[in-house]
Image (spheres, rainbow, N blue to C red):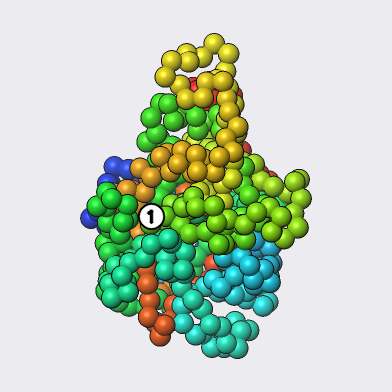
Amino acid sequence: MAIELAPLPLPASADASKFANFGREVIGLNPGKLTPEQLKEVQEALYKYDALLFRNVVVTPEDQYALTKSFDPSSESYGHGNNKTQSTKASILHPDLKTIPRVPQVQLIGNGTVYNHEGLAEAKLKHPSHITFHKTRIPPEEELKATRYYRWHIDAALYDLNPPKVTTLYGLTVPKGESQICRYDDGTGDELEVPLGTTAFVSGRTMFEMLSDEYKSLAVRSKVRYAPHPYVWMAPARAMSTGLGIESEGKELTLDELPSWEESKIKVFPMTWKNPVTGNLHFQVHPCGVKELYIDPLPQGTNRKGTLYPNGAHITDLKQVRELLYEMQRPAISPSLVYPHDWKENDFVLFHNRGLLHTVVGAFTPDQVRAFHQCNLAASDEPTGPSAEDIQKYA
């Protein structure tokens, strides 16, 4: 029997036409107890729809790790390296993750203090807040009613290790509370009502398909070069109010100030990644960690009229790099294109980390306990970029 899928419950704010091929609920299955046939169908559905929700399931850390690993059997370590984030105190990820001792590929994330949890006697968790990361902030008296996207991202170390193929998120303790208004605060007036502590998702496929022809041509010809140790590099800098990248104020660490790094471990990825099942292109760039852009010239015989960088380019000016990426990515985080998941206890979400961007949202009081298990594994291969046919089609 085929697995049963239902559309995700979209908020009234969502443009349903843009979610026709995004997100499905898997009915009546436990993701930790799939038969080989069911697993194959789940894998196919994940790449087709980019996010799958399993409701009211009990999943052990071992189950979660096994399912995550099934998408890439050669992968082994957590996406940022096992036990690595806690030892790298200079990294902006340091406060956000606690490792489950017996399954180091699974992280405990959330808010408040959790006791006697999966081998951890006590874990003090801190929900990431825009207050510590954005250049500007919501006034303190409003910050439990209003909120922001924290940081739009792909789960990836972006140095040495390859971006995970999938991420799994499991909601164990989910605080109840009023919805909050997520403000963009970028002069557009955009805002979105979101459930308390939502995880927000946008489709990388939609992000690509919305681009103008000029930007599509640029996207299929471009590669992005990330900074070495990007989460340490960006730590002194501050983000934009939309959470979609860093303000260009020259606050990043210099390459000499970073932990030792090797040229061979720096990551250069295509701007668009090819879906292994559908063949669609997804615009997959982590805007905070990018340092440079490489743009290939137009293929021989292509119409050059109105094309950006027809002769190719290597853009090293960080402000210019960021402005170009922002112009290309910002339309796809418009309120009508965001899926803010309304977490319930024992929700398990599996998402295509190479097909979408996501972000933490929301603000909690210190005594609101939220506990989630997260797992992703550094991939055994790099993402595949556009094919020669794709470049011919879009360039």
- Image location of residue 138, percent across then percent down: 33, 67
Q: Residue at x 62, y 76 (%)?
A: 100
Q: Give the residue pinned by disc 1.
A: 242
**72 w.r.t. 127: above or below:** above
One can see residue 58 in this view:
no
Across and down, in percent, residue 311 comes to 56, 20
Identified at 76% across, 50% down, the residue is 262
Q: Amino acid at mark 1?
A: Thr
Left or right: 227 as drawn, with respect to 167: right
| Quarter holding residue 123 | bottom right
Determine whether the residue tagged by mark 1 lies in a helix, strand or loop.
Answer: loop
**Residue occupying the point 56% across, 73% down:** 95
Q: How many marks?
A: 1
Front residue (pair 38, 100):
100
Q: Nearer the viewer, residue 199 or 333?
A: 333
263, above or below 70, in the image: above
- Answer above or below: position of 313 versus 287: above
Q: In terms of depth relative to the viewer, which is nearer, 330 or 56? A: 330
Residue at left offset 28%, top offset 72%: 142
Mark 1 Cα within 10 Å, few/some/many (few <14, many 20+)?
many
The location of residue 175, given as percent across then percent down, is 37, 78
Q: Residue 160, how many percent across, how many down?
A: 71, 52
Extreme-front residue of the structure: 250
Q: Is residue 61 left or right of residue 239?
A: right
> Is residue 186 in sight in this rendering?
yes
